[in-house]
Amino acid sequence: MKKTAKMISLLLAAVMALSMVFAGCGSGNGENGGNNAPANSNGANSQSGDVSGESGEAPVRTGDGILKIGVENKGYGDKFANKLAEAFEAKTGIPAKVTKSNSSDWMETTLLAGSKNNDIDVFFDITNLAMKNLATAYFVDEVERAYADITDVYDSKLEGYKEDMTVREAVFPYSLDACTWGGEDAGYGDGKQYFVNWATGFEGLVYNKSLFEKYGITVPKTTNEMFAAMDRMKTLAGGSYAKNSDGYEIYPFAYSGKVNYLDYPMLVWWAQYDGIDSFNNGMHGMDVNGNYTAESQKTVGKLSAFSIVSKLLDVDNKYTDPNSSSYSFTDAQVMFLAEQAFMMSTGDWLEREMSTNFSESMEIGFMRIPVNSDIVAQCQSISTDEQLSQVVAYVDGETATKPAFVSDADLAFVKSARSMYCSEGNQHICYIPAYSDMIPEAKQFIKFMLSKEGQEIMLEYSYGNMAMLNLDVSQFDYYSKLSSLQRSKLEIMQGGDGATFVGKNYVHPMNYAGGLELTYNHMEMSFGVVKSSGAYKTAKDFWESEYERIASKFTSMMAQAGVSN
């Protein structure tokens, strides 16, 4: 099927007005969360400048031989950048200086200021507008592209690891796709790499291990088991909720009605049902044959995922605090860490944001996301949730013998589903402006950041965060010092064949130019309100309204993206 992309600069100039800033770790609907939340500095290198998001004239390039690094002080802080700069300078003799900002639009504004008004050579960004900027090359001086080509970084060897591999071989496929600008098969772009993901942005379901153990709750393998566990959590104290040490009821689940953190497991449950290839096609607005069609957004897997979230938030089921629809993301996180809930959906930035609320006696961690029980409809040899759970146990290595009833095809399908997790790592991009006068040194710095020494620094000074490298985490010296939350994340990522990441991805013209989104309305504000409310929608109503909105604009989206069948 013929697919073309008409990347016209004048057309994409209009795209600059699109509101495409997706929060690095948690996003909008009137309230920012995660990486867009106000953050206190972790402490800055004495060399650091601090623009703190204030307006004013940007610095002029000095040509002084100092490698200048820009970082947004958000969910993972800025201390890691200062420590990397110090170690890089000590190792190479190349002076390095860090400038930080608390503003979410500082990176793009600074980049677009051009070489006469920007002296940053390496950016640690958290809002991926990069593909749009690649396609709109004319605004940055007279360089061919806004960013320096770092394909050679991907082809270089990783330094200091047990593994003998290149960066390209080590990064998760999800990350490589997110950092590659199209290619011949894609019908747009040149197939080169212009960015590297410096953070994993791991997201999913976090649970209080201490509470699970105290009340003998088994970590669920399927969504049916998850709801069965939550039903039990409602009856632990003589048919009612158990209470914490302060006398507050412990609900099965905590969430914020104002921030869409439940997108994280929702996207996974969607991808588990439809399969990763179909899901990824849907990211681009395509069906399985590669045709652009609004029908790609109305899959059974998407409805199934909405149904799970709808059941989870249904006020009649009483899995959540009845006031949750009015909670901010910080309210929900505080509630969870105060042992007023067994589980919640959040990201790996939780520890940094809520450091004053962590209790040394409480052990929390990411759980492997329960497999969508509806996928039995996709299997020929698995017909019940009990059988699905047995297959998951085998995939997890809990049982050594493969269930006799499961076919190889169904086993592979369940294994793929079990490996899925949500990530906003694709929004956390490290890049070099094409007009930098220190491109070789900047590339050297990125290689250092990806080296074992650099990743040791990342693990220690960005709260257990690391780049999207599929490596044996046991080789890192700092691994044993990490919290249970961060160790659980790394163990999940590296278990078996490694994680299969899913997430909102703006690498395709239909996303960064056409405006295609996975959801346009707020699930929490449709599912978690009383049924008499005019805002309430069933999962099917929500699914259909989402489709109708996309279908009504799909042709214009294609035209704005410059794509055709």
Image: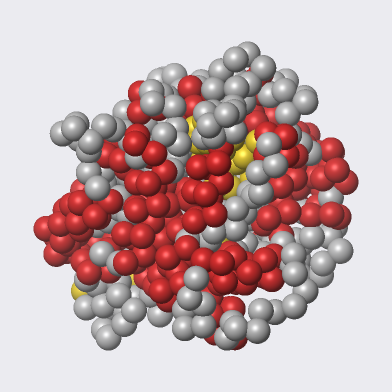
- Position of 40 relative to 420 (above/below): above
The chosen color scheme is secondary structure
- Position of 462 relative to 270 (above/below): above
Give how far across and how far down residue 238 sits, in percent.
Answer: 57, 29
Residue drawn at the location 71% of the way across and 60% of the way down: 494
Residue drawn at the location 64% of the way across and 50% of the way down: 219
- Residue 269 appears left or right of 337: left
Give how far across and how far down residue 204 sits, in percent.
Answer: 55, 47
Give how far across and how far down residue 254 sits, in percent.
Answer: 49, 32
- Residue 341 appears left or right of 364: left
Give how far across and how far down residue 364 sits, in percent.
Answer: 69, 36
Say if residue 237 shows up in the picture: yes
Q: Nearer the viewer, residue 218 or 10?
A: 218
- Residue 93 appears left or right of 492: right
- Residue 490 appears left or right of 372: right
Specify the quadrant that holds the N terminus. bottom left
Q: Nearer the viewer, residue 177 or 398?
A: 398
Q: Nearer the viewer, residue 541 or 481?
A: 541
Say if residue 144 shows up in the picture: no
Q: Quadrant of residue 529?
A: top left
Specify the quadrant that holds the C terminus. bottom left
Residue drawn at the location 43% of the way across and 55% of the way down: 267
- Position of 331 relative to 162 (above/below): above
